[in-house]
């Protein structure tokens, strides 16, 4: 009976195996099982042996492994040959040490396997996928299904299972998963993974910084050394960035030569700036690939969650905007998107925010700067200059907002507004009987690259019944050199329409003559850099101007000299037969009403203009202490329209101070007599002074440096303290003693602001 006792459970479990509907893994074997009548099997030893041999033959030729136990943790009663091959252990060893196979399970999955066996003990069927290290120390992935047999008392009396080696399938799935989520070249997470990571981090809501890297001039490596060298360089760059990624940080390759780093758990923003500086410093080390030594730099754009964006797309766009600014600053640097870091950042944020409403609110206006025939002063045309009268920041020059408009793609709408406005004004002048002159509009190359410019210009000319020769479109030479054949084609189409084409800032590029030959402009404008040097001893600049004038005549092009401010410059240009003069010597840019009066007269006189001094400077109620040297100070915006704002500080120089106010120098153009309140901080005689005030007047001090008069609103305590300090400094000066413990600046003004 010992043999029967051993074999009968085997047959019963085999019967259970083939009749169990839950076991879908071996459905194909049901066809074989159905041919066997278990009920008719006679339990004689010979018949049993025959049936067992039939099943053993089937199981031993399956690639899966079949096994069975008397109970969940009982002895192993049967294991097929496939079981032996999968585990790479002899069947004898498996029978003798049944727990050995569970020792093979990877440590990270032991708990999962144990939990599933507990479910089997409760009578539940389980299926699990887990890795093992087999008898030959090979890693394998097994898919196992276990089915318990529960008796009439609800106790598990028998357990059988089936294991399948799915290592090949798992490897393929892992490879596909890797290719779907990782970059095959650098092995970093790819764009898909990055987007999922950012979406998850944004949902979780914890603060993080996003650093956007772009490898500078990487296309030069690909184009000159080939993509194989370029790919190797990207691998080394990825390794370098990986080594610099902080703990719990995240690094991904966005595309081509762009990488994104996410940094969490930082103390403050300063730590992120230090990380950026460290990365830039590391990039100073050359990279050697084969026999090539590559000097690679990177530019970095930085933005913060949630202050500067609460969604993935917003954060990436803002970081790219900051990156663009880093590129414009000369590359190999980092730039912040933050609008609260300092006053320039805040101003840029406000202008970007309000620009879309400016057109709707009619905040843009056109100024006209006359172009004059030099000998008689006859007006022969004008350049139109757009201005933005911002409700908070006052008069904004195009030099400030046009580059910003090019970033946010508003420049196309602004240029179109200018073109239509000029056509409407020309129509109005024609209706009033004024003499018409060509009006020149400076057009961004971005507008040339957008489809439909020629059609739009033609439509406006027809709408306002303006002849095309009265409209001139300018493109700067430096921009022209960066554009493609499409822009040149559009310029030719405009000329064919009858519209004039001018090249601005002529002489600053490197392929000027070639482009003159290609587009044949009607007008070339000499860059004011050359005009400024007419008074100097530089014969080179004078020679360049004379050559441009001669070239223009030979090519039948009109030449305009920009930025003419004194009679010496005018005399030189007249002597060399310059066609037109544009500059403050004849007229500054004026609003439409004033220009209409000019064209009715028809000519202008050359008048040497002196810099105006503000009369407000002399209206002083308090003694003003003139400092022996400039003091380093900080300035920030405290309130706008009586609303408190949080803005970082910007360096200024303090020239003098009194109880009524101070005079400061800044490289920022700020609104005076506005609804802005500023906060100033400086140190004198080892005491830090913080005062609030408003800007009362402004004067041009140097190129891009302005002086401001600030009026205070002091409380009694601060007034007494400041009075004491001024009196003490006055005493020290009278007694020829130095003023100690004061942050004096010994640099030249321009040098100081260049550093800051």
Image: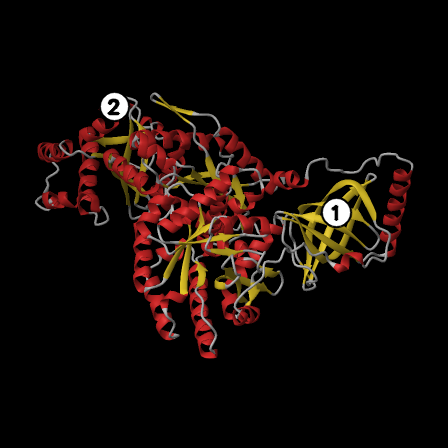
Quadrant in the picture for residue 608: bottom right
Q: Which residue is mark 2?
A: 89
- The x and y percentages for residue 207 are 55, 47
Q: Nearer the viewer, residue 436 or 131?
A: 436
Q: Is residue 666 visible?
A: yes
Look at the image and tell me in which quarter the C terminus lies.
top right
* Numbered disc 2: secondary structure: loop
Q: Camera-side residue: 91 or 662?
A: 662
Does 642 appear above or below 489?
Answer: below
Q: Quadrant of residue 591?
A: bottom right
Residue at the disc numbered 1: 681
Secondary-structure class at tag 1: strand
CA gap, disc 2 to disc 1?
80 Å
Q: Can residue 231 be seen in the rendering of this structure? A: no
Q: Quadrant of residue 45?
A: top left
Q: Position of residue 624 (x, y in %)?
A: 84, 50
Q: Upstream in the sequence, badge 2 or badge 1? A: 2
Residue at (89%, 51%) from the top-left corner? 720
């Amino acid at each position: 009976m010992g043999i029967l006792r051993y074999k009968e459970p085997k047959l019963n479990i085999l019967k259970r195996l083939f009749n169990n509907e839950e076991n879908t893994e071996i459905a194909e074997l049901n066809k074989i099982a159905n041919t066997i009548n278990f009920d008719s099997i006679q339990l004689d030893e010979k018949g049993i042996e025959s049936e067992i041999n039939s099943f053993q033959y089937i199981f031993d030729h399956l690639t899966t492994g079949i096994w069975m136990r008397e109970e969940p943790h009982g002895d192993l009663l049967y294991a097929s040959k496939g079981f032996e091959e999968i585990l790479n252990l002899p069947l004898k060893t498996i029978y003798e040490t049944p727990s050995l196979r569970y020792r093979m399970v990877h440590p990270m999955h032991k708990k999962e396997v144990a939990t599933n066996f507990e479910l089997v003990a409760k009578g539940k069927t389980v299926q699990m996928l887990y890795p093992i290290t087999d008898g030959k120390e090979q890693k394998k992935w097994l898919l196992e299904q276990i089915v318990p047999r529960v008796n009439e008392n609800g106790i598990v009396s028998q357990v059988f299972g089936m294991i399948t080696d799915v290592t090949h399938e798992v490897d393929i799935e892992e490879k596909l998963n890797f290719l779907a989520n990782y970059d095959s070249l650098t092995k970093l997470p790819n764009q898909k993974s990055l987007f999922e990571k950012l979406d998850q981090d944004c949902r979780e809501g914890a603060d993080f910084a996003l650093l956007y890297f772009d490898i500078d001039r990487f296309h030069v490596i690909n184009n000159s050394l080939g993509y194989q060298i370029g790919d190797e360089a990207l691998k080394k760059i990825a390794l370098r960035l990986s080594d610099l990624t902080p703990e719990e940080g995240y690094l991904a390759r966005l595309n081509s030569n762009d990488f994104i780093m996410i940094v969490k758990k930082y103390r403050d923003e300063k730590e992120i700036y230090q990380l950026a500086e460290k990365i830039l410093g590391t990039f100073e080390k050359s990279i050697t690939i084969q026999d090539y030594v590559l000097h690679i730099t990177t530019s970095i754009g930085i933005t913060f969650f949630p202050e500067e964006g609460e969604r993935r797309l917003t954060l990436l766009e803002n970081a790219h905007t900051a990156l663009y600014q880093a590129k414009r600053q000369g590359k190999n640097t980092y730039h912040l998107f933050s609008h609260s870091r300092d006053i320039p950042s805040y101003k840029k944020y406000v202008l970007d925010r309000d620009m879309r409403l400016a057109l709707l609110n009619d905040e843009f206006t056109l100024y006209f700067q006359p172009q004059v025939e030099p000998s008689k002063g006859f007006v022969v045309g004008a350049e139109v200059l757009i201005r933005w009268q911002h409700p908070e920041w006052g008069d904004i020059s195009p030099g400030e907002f046009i580059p910003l408009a090019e970033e946010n793609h508003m420049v196309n709408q602004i240029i179109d507004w200018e073109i239509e406005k000029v056509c409407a004004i020309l129509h109005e002048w024609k209706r009033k009987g004024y003499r018409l002159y060509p009006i020149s509009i400076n057009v961004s190359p971005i507008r040339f690259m957008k489809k439909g410019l020629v059609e739009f210009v033609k439509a406006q000319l027809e709408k306002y019944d303006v002849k095309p020769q009265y409209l001139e479109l300018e493109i700067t030479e430096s921009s022209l050199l960066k554009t493609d054949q499409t822009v040149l084609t559009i310029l030719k189409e405009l000329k064919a329409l009858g519209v004039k084409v001018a090249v601005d800032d002529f002489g600053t590029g490197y392929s000027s003559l070639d482009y003159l030959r290609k587009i044949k402009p009607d007008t070339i404008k000499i860059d004011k850099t050359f005009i400024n040097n007419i008074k100097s001893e530089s014969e080179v600049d004078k020679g360049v101007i004379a050559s441009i004038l001669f070239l223009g005549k030979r090519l039948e092009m009109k030449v305009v000299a920009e930025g003419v401010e004194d009679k010496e410059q005018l005399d030189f240009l007249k002597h060399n037969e310059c066609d037109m003069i544009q500059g403050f010597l004849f007229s500054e840019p004026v609003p439409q009403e004033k220009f209409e009066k000019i064209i009715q007269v028809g000519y202008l006189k050359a008048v040497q203009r002196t810099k105006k001094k503000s009369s407000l400077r002399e209206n002083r109620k308090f003694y003003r202490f003139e400092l022996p040297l400039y003091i380093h100070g900080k300035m920030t915006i405290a309130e706008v329209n009586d609303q408190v704002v949080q803005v970082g500080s910007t360096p200024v120089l303090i020239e003098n101070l009194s109880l009524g106010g101070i005079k400061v120098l800044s490289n920022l153009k700020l609104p005076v007599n506005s609804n802005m309140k500023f906060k100033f901080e400086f140190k004198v005689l080892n005491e830090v002074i913080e005062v609030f005030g408003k800007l009362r007047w402004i004067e041009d001090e140097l190129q891009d440096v302005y002086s401001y008069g600030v009026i205070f609103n002091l409380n009694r305590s601060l007034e007494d303290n400041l009075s004491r300090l001024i009196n003490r400094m006055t005493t020290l000066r009278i007694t020829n003693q130095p003023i100690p413990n004061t942050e004096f600046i010994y640099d030249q003004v321009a040098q100081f602001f260049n550093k800051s």
